[in-house]
Image (cartoon, rainbow, N blue to C red):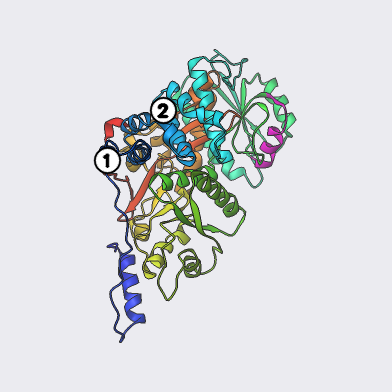
Amino acid sequence: MKQSLRGLLAAALVAFLVAGCAMQSPSVVDRVPVEDPGQLLNQAEQQAPEQAAKTRLEAANILARQGERKRAFEAADGIDESLLSEPDRVRWALLFSELARALDEPRAVLRATQVLDDELPMQASQQERLAERQRWAREALGQPGAVTVALPELEGQAIRRIVVALPESGPLSSVANTIATAMRQHHDVKGGNTELSFLDASRYSLDELYDRAQQMNAQLMIGPLDKSQVTQLEQRDSVPLPTLALNYGSGDNNQAQRLFQYGLSAEDEARQAARRAWQDGHRQMSMMVPDNDWGRRVGEAFWNEWHSQGGEVANAVRYNPDSSVSSAVQTALNVSGERARLSNIDALFLLALPEYARQVPPTMDYYYAPDLPIYATSHLHEGRLQTRLDQDLNDVMFMDIPWQIPDAAVGGEEALPFASTYQSLRDESDASMFRLMAMGVDAYELALRFSNLNELNGLNGSTGMLYLNDDGRIYRELPWAKFQNGVPSPILIPNRNVSDE
């Protein structure tokens, strides 16, 4: 049972409800201990070949989630994948290719992605992920068949003239102003010879914006911000100037040449939560997402990614943010007789804003589910120190941008990406807008790299590690933290070898 204010509150509520009645102490939810990967590898030496391959795969998975990439890579590399079942071979390919790419081992990536030629049953998202890694490996090795997203008109040039097209009026003007402020500040802190100019996107059509940008001799344009306009652009064959849109279109992919898309995608976070929960050994999840369009989109992203990993969703709850938390938790956790029934649930995915999110763990405590792991997106974190309020989020695991959790993400503010700009913006910014500030800084940094798109992959940004998909969409990988005593703290993993990072 967690030692927190919420635990004491939950205990008091239980005592009040059952006063005068005899009852047994609630049993603690059983948890299977994390197995020792070294012990598993030793066991594999004594097993028949088929079982040994499966055991080594489990060991590699454990090592990967413990952060020991090199040992995980070595364990996966030593597996004879032909001895694995088809589902396990797909799992091996996804894990081994991910590790190989992180360690810059393109030949190992090609070995892992050979499963694409064997027509194994897999989800479309798994196939796309493997195909993207295969293209990266072929490009790294200079092999035919590699796909490059290229901007020949900028290749080898210094980026000197950037036009930013953001609305100065209308519903997105506040967001746009925050992003623009951060860009200007970072531009001033960074110095250099780049000219940064701004156009009011609320005054002109898309074609007019491009005409004006070209008249200003812009090498590239940052914007638009409006999702519907990005959707219009991604349906074209090409755009007049290399463009970094600050949102994602609604299509399944971006087909327009010279158009790139970047933003703070909640769907990316949901997919990352699904991958993390799977790596941590969970297989049956419950979900709680708000009953609105945002909740539907993010919930679908989690659901699809979770199923692509091979997981099952036990309960999917779409809650009313203005209604009782208790009823949503009861449904999510199969509550019967005031007690959660967790025989088919081993973790919970939570999408919620802070006020709602803070009520969920105490309610779970009340229903005797204090130890059920919770995986959440950045949206439950307001970004400022509120230890009293956030005590109720203790032990909740969530991801956020490095600029919001510097101590947990990188070990302190001085180690942050673009730390000088961070220092200049931190004290003068509203915490609720700080993620947008970081987005503006990263958008500027991405634009400066348009003359060499290889530099976009693995960019250590203010909003996370940034990667470029083949269709020009940029996605983020975020660091994880856990609330402890109301403060975001690093997630300590047993046997973690920091030198392997």
Q: Amino acid at mark 2?
A: Ala
Above or below: residue 138 compared with residue 260 = above
Quarter of the image holding residue 249? top right
For this orientation, the residue located farthest to the top is 156
Residue 67, given in percent of the width and then of the height, sits at 33, 37
Q: Looking at the image, tell me whether mark 2 or mark 1 is earlier in sequence order.
A: 1
- What's the distance in space between the residues labelled 2 and 1, CA to CA? 25 Å
Q: Give the residue number, with chain letter if any, for mark 2.
A: 100
Q: Quadrant of the C terminus?
A: top left
Residue 118, given in percent of the width and then of the height, sits at 55, 31
**Magenta range:** 226-240
At horizontal 69% and vertical 41% (from top left) the residue drawn is 228
Circle 1 residues within 10 Å: few <14, some 14–19, many ≥20: some
Q: Amino acid at mark 1?
A: Gln
Quarter of the image holding residue 132? top right
Mark 2 element type: helix
Q: Give the residue number, with chain letter if any, for mark 1.
A: 43
Task: Choose between 234 and 138: the one closer to the eye.
Answer: 138
Question: 374 left or right of 199?
Answer: left
Residue 13, given in percent of the width and then of the height, sits at 35, 76
- Can residue 447 be spotted in the picture? yes
Q: How many marks?
A: 2
Q: Quadrant of the N terminus?
A: bottom left
Residue 180, given in percent of the width and then of the height, sits at 55, 35
Mark 1 element type: helix
Magenta stretch contains residue 28: no
Above or below: residue 85 compared with residue 22 = above
- Can residue 185 be spotted in the picture? no
